[in-house]
Image: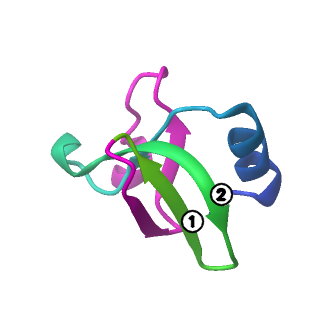
Amino acid sequence: MITEDLLDQYRVDGTLIRVVRDADAKNDVKGIVVAWDDETVMIRKQNRRIVKLDRNHHYQPFAEERNVEWIEG
């Protein structure tokens, strides 16, 4: 689960992030962190729509190479 500190850093910096939900790259969500609570994170996508995602997904900066090791291990 992603930490409060990391979420806050992504929000304050306006970091474009990738949310890896499964092994298929088509299902990734790209956007910026808007808000969060104990179980969910709200991401604003490029088309300005807000999606609410589980905090147990893998969150990483979009500039980094896509990481799916956490799915396999």
Left/right of residue 6 with respect to residue 45 in the rendered view: right
Spatial distance from mark 1 to mark 2, Cα to Cα?
10 Å
Q: Identify the disc placed on residue 17.
A: none
Near-viewer residue (33 or 27): 33
Q: Reply yes or no: does residue 7 show up in magenta.
A: no
- Farthest right residue? 5
| Label 2: which secondary element | loop
- Residue depicted at 40% across the width and 64% down the height: 51
On the question of residue 64 being in view, the answer is yes
Residue 50, image x, y percentages: 42, 61
**Foreground: 3 or 9?**
9
Q: Mark 1 = which residue?
A: 41
Q: Which residue is mark 2?
A: 2
Residue 35 x, y percent position in the rendering:
65, 63
Which residue is rendered at x = 53% and y = 38% of the image? Answer: 60
Q: Residue furthest front?
A: 48
Q: Which residues are magenta?
A: 47-73
Which of 21 and 45 lies nearest the eye of the viewer?
45
What residue is rendered at 34% in x and 51% in y?
72
State the image coordinates of residue 41 (x, y, percent, origin top left). 57, 65
